[in-house]
Amino acid sequence: MRTSGFALASLFLPASAIAQLSIAYESQELANGLKVILHEDHSVPLVTVNIWYHVGSGREKPGRTGFAHLFEHMLFQGSANVGDDQHFGYIQEAGGTLNGSTNNDRTNYFETVPRQFLEMTLWLEADRMGFLLPAMTQVKLDNQRDVVKNERRQGVDNQPYGRAFECIHALLYEPAYPYHWPVIGSMDDLSAASLEDVKEFFRTYYVPNNASLVIAGDFDPAQTKRWVEEYFGGIPRGGEIPPPGVEAPALEGEKVDLMEDRVQLPRLYLAWHSAAIAAPDDAELDVLADVLVGGKNSRLFKTLVYEKQIAQDVSAFQFSRRLSGMFMIQVTAKPEHTLSEMKNVVQAEIDKLKRSPPTERELERSKNSTKAAFVNRLQSIGAKADQINNYNFFWGDPGAFERDIARYQSITPSDVQRVANKYLTTSRVVFSVVPLGQPELAAQ
């Protein structure tokens, strides 16, 4: 809902948390639709500017993948009033740090600078939001396309187990579903991207009404509001962007596949569809992952790595995103052991949880770990700024800290047992990565 001015609210953890933390913020929506959130913290003379564009690889189309990540690179290549690579130069010469990242749902950019350089940082962000296209050229596109291709070669194609996740996503989601393709895109799609394709992507998604700006740290709020209005207020609003209309993903039965790769040890991946971020069962699935593989006393680590000594490592996580989630268990076998053996042991532990809930001690360990993680996320200006933007985007509430941690604290052992039965079914992906020429090591 649009407001005429900044509304005061507060973010705080409940008394049961490790420490009582209170975080005040102010929020405003400019006339062009840009959401602005301010959080003052005068403990150190630093300020973070953190902007989220509400577009990730999930907004791309089959045949035109990789645009969101490509834009993460393009936005550092200069705009109408900022020369090539000068964005890096201005921030680093001021003693600041900066970066950006892309995932399925959003792209973010962030700078942390000494407080006296806040105005410059706001101007830099506004210039590339409002005036990137005049400086975008075919030469810059070709240059950054090659950088991203090389990044894919290094981080995916030539990385041990590097292609596993995109293979799993391709099995788990139908071709038209927004999470089917990898964030970094494919080589063919990156090669096919034209300058006009890229410009149209920018005009559609890099607009004020599809962004949220968080400013956190040591600043004067009255002056900062004036700067925000001066530099961002005149940027035209873009077209309305409807939410993606997709059906919930589903699997009918088990999908089994394998990939031979230049690896020394075979690795097993088990993946299921799960709850979206902040949706019912999302927190319970986090705790389920923690009970299975949350430290050396967790069930799968204890069985596979410590007692049986048949696995090199094991991990589990609830990967929750805006449209849907993925629950994954990953096991790397030791030499002389097969992935079918890993699969059978993992399944036995899952079946135990389905029959009997975890103990109160297991649950308390997970809750304590969650509380510690909440506190750690609030230790730096940059982390706080990004968490506020995270809550604004995924929860529709920059002050969702209390709501977030409360959902973990209310979980019972029977809740964990329930989600194990609900989600960890035989409708799943079983994916094996094995050394070249050794398909017999794959899970059957």
Image: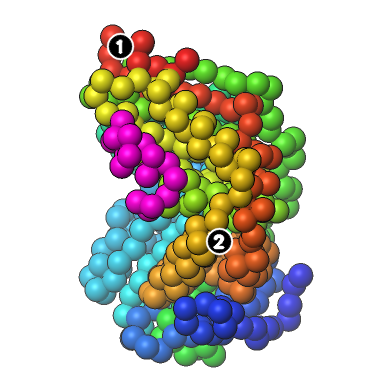
Q: Is mark 1 on a helix, strand or loop?
A: loop
What span is colored magenta in the figure? 295-313
CA neighbours of label 1 inside 10 A, class few (<14), some (14 to 19), many (20+): few
Q: In which quarter of the image is residue 70?
A: top left
Q: Is residue 42 visible?
A: yes
Kind of residue indicated by mark 1: Gln
- 220 relative to 148 in the view: left or right: right
Q: Is mark 2 on a helix, strand or loop?
A: helix
Q: Can residue 136 be seen in this view?
A: no
**Foreground pick, 181 / 314:** 314
Kind of residue indicated by mark 2: Glu
- 279 relative to 155 in the view: left or right: right
User: Where is residue 232 shown, x and y percent of the image?
Assistant: 55, 70
User: Where is residue 208 shown, x and y percent of the image?
Assistant: 61, 61
Q: Which residue is drawn at 47% across and 68% down?
A: 368
Residue bearing the label numbered 1? 438
Residue bearing the label numbered 2? 360
